[in-house]
Image (cartoon, rainbow, N blue to C red):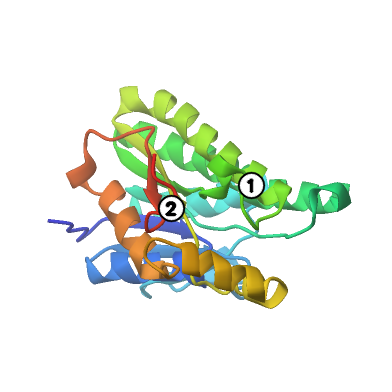
Amino acid sequence: MLDFNGKVVFITGANCGIGAATVARFLERGARVMGADITYPSVEPGKINFKENPIKIHLDVKNAKKVTGAINLVAEKYGRIDVAVNAAGILRLYPILEQKEEDWDEVMAVNVKGVLFVCQAVMKVMMRQKSGSIVNIGSTSGITGGALAGADYSASKAAVICLTKSFAKAGAPYGIRVNSIAPGGINTPMSEIYYEKFPEAMKRYIAAHPMKRWGEPGEVASAIVFLASEEASYMTGTCMHVNGGSLMI
């Protein structure tokens, strides 16, 4: 039912956490996956091995020119992009009264501008083909303000959820669906900082959690695959909550 055989999928933040799990899910379903991540080695476009699957593309999502170049390269090579997933993101945990301008700017640049740049570039490709699906990764903290996340991270994820709705309105006449996922606490390398900085608070948080645990990246990836599939063909502008019941709305 969730078959992506022959589909071209572009995923940012592909080298760890939710992004890596999403790469694996799409590969299992037959997709041709382009994984983009700032941690991948930088290779000249002409030297990328497009026979690999997934293909690993070095990309700093803060750089609009680089983002557009990477997406156009993929579109030229395969003639289309069927799915784009924005999983790249960074997390900071500064108290709001200690928030520094440079930290705020960095988080916004990666978490918000990165989504904006990818959506802008990939939507132009999808408009030409009159189809496509985009899934952006928000967060429960983008709705609640975050129990532990920094104000910059929470604000950035609220922006992602709103950006998703704006792109959904722009894309709908062209057969393009744009949705977001709002994960709750998920066990990823990014979230390890919670356990390091707030060990006692984490114990209390998990004890009070309806499922008594945090989620796994694969559980979020499964929701992403569903939203990207034709099984969700009448869903756009939606924010799907994957939080184990920590927020019920």
- Front-most of residues 4 and 202: 202
- For the C terminus, the quadrant is top left
Q: Secondary structure at mark 1?
A: helix
Residue 49, above or below 247: below
- Front-most of residues 96 and 45: 96
Residue 103 in picture, x, y percent from top left: 81, 54
Residue 80, above or below 193: above
- Whichever of callouts 2 and 1 sits on the residue coming sooner in the sequence is 2
Mark 2: amino acid: Val
Left or right of 86 on screen, residue 114: right
Q: Which mark is residue 85?
A: 2
Residue in view at x 48 percent, y 63 percent: 208
Residue 159 in picture, x, y percent from top left: 60, 37
> Is disc 2 surrounded by few (<14), some (14 to 19) or many (20+) residues within 10 Å?
many
Residue 228 in picture, x, y percent from top left: 30, 48
Residue 106, above or below 17: above
Q: From where the camera sits, is residue 186 visible? A: no
Q: Determine which quarter of the picture holds residue 222.
A: bottom left
Residue 164 in picture, x, y percent from top left: 47, 36
Mark 1: amino acid: Ser
Q: From where the camera sits, is residue 158 visible? A: yes
Left or right of 213 on screen, residue 131: left
Distance in Å between CA atoms under marks 2 and 1: 19 Å
Q: Secondary structure at mark 2?
A: strand
Left or right of 199 on screen, residue 173: left
Circle 2 or circle 1, nearest the eye: 1
Left or right of 73 on screen, residue 32: left
Q: Which residue is mark 1?
A: 154
Number of labels in the image equals 2
> Is disc 1 surrounded by few (<14), some (14 to 19) or many (20+) residues within 10 Å?
many
